[in-house]
Amino acid sequence: MPKKKTEKETKRPTSNPNVLGLQAQVLEQPITQTLETNYMPYAMSVIVSRAIPEIDGFKPSHRKLLYTMYKMGLLTGPRTKSANIVGQTMRLNPHGDAAIYETMVRLSRGNGALLTPFVDSKGNFGKVYSRDMSYAAPRYTEAKLSSICSELFRDIDSDTVDFVDNYDGTMKEPSLLPTTFPNVLVSANMGIAVGMASQICGFNLTECCQATIDYLNDPDCDVMRSMPAPDFATGGEIIYNEAEMRKIYDTGRGSFPVRARWRHDTKANIIEIYEIPYTTKAEIIIDKVAELVKTGKIKEISDMRDETDLNGLKLAIDLKKGTDPALVMQKLYKMTPLQDNFPCNFNVLIGGYPRVMGVKEILSEWCAWRMESVRRRVYFDLGKKKDKLHLLQGLGKILLDIDKAIRIIRETEKEAEVVPNLMTGFQIDDIQANYVAEIKLRNINREYILKRLEETAQLEKDIADLQAVLESKRRIKGIIIGELKDIMKKYPMERKTGIILAEEAPTISEEEIVPDYACTVFLSREGYFKKITPQSLRMNAEQKYKDGDSLRVSMETSNRKEFLVFTDRQQVYKLRLRDMEDTKASVLGTYLPAKLGMDEGESVLTMIPAETDATLLLAFENGKIAKFPVSVYDTKTNRKRLTGAYSDKSPLVEVLPIREEGEFVLVSSEGRALVFQSAELQLKSTRSTQGVAVMKLKPKYKVTQLCALGESGIVNRSRYKAKTLPTAGALLRPEDRGEEQPNLFGEE
């Protein structure tokens, strides 16, 4: 009989690893160690191997693509399919065909992203100024290297740069390209790494070469004389502020405004925009203008469309009759990306380490690197010439007694012994002997001998000259300057981006952009706000409120005004009427706590115009009044909420703006009134002041109202006039209660 299983044996396995005989182990690792061992290598890889350009002006992806095209013979040969180039580049760049093709698109002439494109393209490569005009697939397009790429690869086979293994060690690739001009400044470049970024604006090739020549001749020169400002492939105009631009040139950080270029077709009354800032796209501009027209912020435009064709970019704006096109453009510059700031962050890898540098410092690093490349090329040429001279010197010894050489060769029985016998017979080395042994019999003539002797003399002169170059920085600088002058002559370039002095550029203030028209504002006690035009108010003046709600504030004003909204949490919110939609009296209006993003449970108390030349009287329930200027709520930044806007020692009752001193009335819940002169209150400079005691109150009473004497309805002024402060005031008589204004003192 089978053995009966025990309870332990029949129990099902559980998910607990210990039951299965396994040992689960949790390894604790400090977060600092995790960052150091796991995250930092990744971060450094992104910084060094992907996002930040090096001194030759290229990221690894650019360099691998261009070098592959160079090895494919596309510098002088015909174009080939882009798909072929992408496939070949994957031998150096394993990041996928899409990323490689995107890189080629940006470098292409057709895309127009660079002032000096390196890829001569054929087909649809999209446009840098368009978001929706996408490039065709690589199987449909063709490409080769532009002629200027000969300056990128000049003498690359002369040991001018180091070569390293590719990712799988099957071939070599250059660590840098030996560019003969400062491409790091000429080509616009943007990259986002881990914890840092790079944003380099492009400069004009001719201007950059001239600035480099000036720097090589005089390191203390002002490079802004030759290279006054950046230049962009999309053109436009730079609003030039010399102080700000010099700061960018000195530090490598800062920003400057770039705006679109336009012309006015007077017959059709159309604005044509034909160049836009490098930082934006045509579709973004059209969407923004459409939004402004829809919301009524720009009323002079009837339509806008994209008329871009083979001749280039053109955005057409139809204007209404009687519209000033210059004024419309000033508004569009202010409110759309037609004028945008280009941020600069000249972050470049120098020796494998990122450094933010100014223009002159970048030129200094490039010149030092280029001088080393030229020195390596000269040293390479020197070695070649020395090797050749060495061969010719051996040949010279042979030619002194050619009959002896022939006899040695003829009498040698074995072929392998020819070279050793020549070495012994003429006291030459193995290399020289092999060279002599390979000379054809037909070359053993007088003419050949004389030419070789002349060549030897010329080689000796060349070697002496090259050695002199190696020992002279001035000679090396002269070589670089000569190459730069050749580039300026072969590839002349006119500026695409215009320069307009900031003081000469017409500007428009934000107030002028906002349409100015009369309106009346209403604020209910529960915080509902309305802005109503006079026309709408004439059609229906009866205001709609929620049950139990009523009017708190109403006043006539204009659309350009700004208001301060006081709440019960000692906070003030800035409300611009231009941001509020026009509405009708028959609607509840906008709920301000939601619109202004107030805290939960926060309620609106009142609102006043933000007129900085006015003075505020803030009445508190404890009988104190604070007096300070409205200007205490001014801020340098565009903050919409100010905390600690007034004292929290007692609840706020009323905020009253005044323009001149006068008599005012305080009323308490006891029914007492007090007339006082505002000039008796000391003006404070801080909004947190607790105020001055004005009305004495019994413990169970509080202040309920503050208003101007003329609005109070009080007839017997002298009865309530305060002789000294603080005082309790006098009980209101029936004739002083202002019955024509039953709600003034909280009565029903």
Image: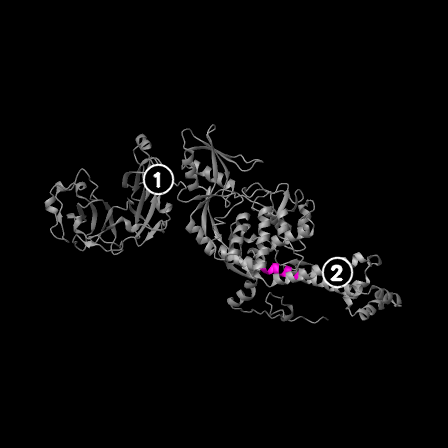
At horizontal 55% and vertical 48% (from top left) the residue drawn is 205
Where 18 sits versus 139, above or below? Answer: below
| Disc 1/disc 2 C-alpha distance (Å) | 103 Å
Left or right, 668 with respect to 245, comes to: left
Front of the two marks 1 and 2: 2
- In percent of width and height, residue 232 lies at 52, 45
Q: Residues within 10 Å of mark 2 (few under 14, many from 20)?
A: some
Left or right, 102 with respect to 590, comes to: right
What's the amino acid at mark 2? Leu
Where 81 sits versus 45, above or below? Answer: above
Ranked by sequence position, the earlier of labels 1 and 2 is 2
Left or right, 350 with respect to 165, comes to: left
Mark sitting on residue 589: 1
What's the amino acid at mark 1? Gly
Mark sitting on residue 453: 2
Q: Quadrant of the N terminus?
A: bottom right
Mark sitting on residue 710: none
Q: Does the magenta stretch include residue 249?
A: no
Residue 47 seen in the figure: no
Asked if marks 1 and 2 touch (Cβ < 8 Å), the reply is: no
Left or right, 559 with respect to 445, comes to: left
**Part of the protein shown in magenta:** 370-381
- In percent of width and height, residue 588 lies at 34, 39
Residue 108 seen in the figure: yes
Q: Quadrant of the C terminus?
A: top left
Q: How crowded is mark 1: few (under 14 residues within 10 Å), some or many (20 or more)?
A: many
Where 470 sits versus 679, above or below? Answer: below
Q: Is residue 375 magenta?
A: yes
- In percent of width and height, residue 6 lies at 65, 71
Q: Main secondary structure of the magenta part?
A: helix
Tag 2 secondary structure: helix
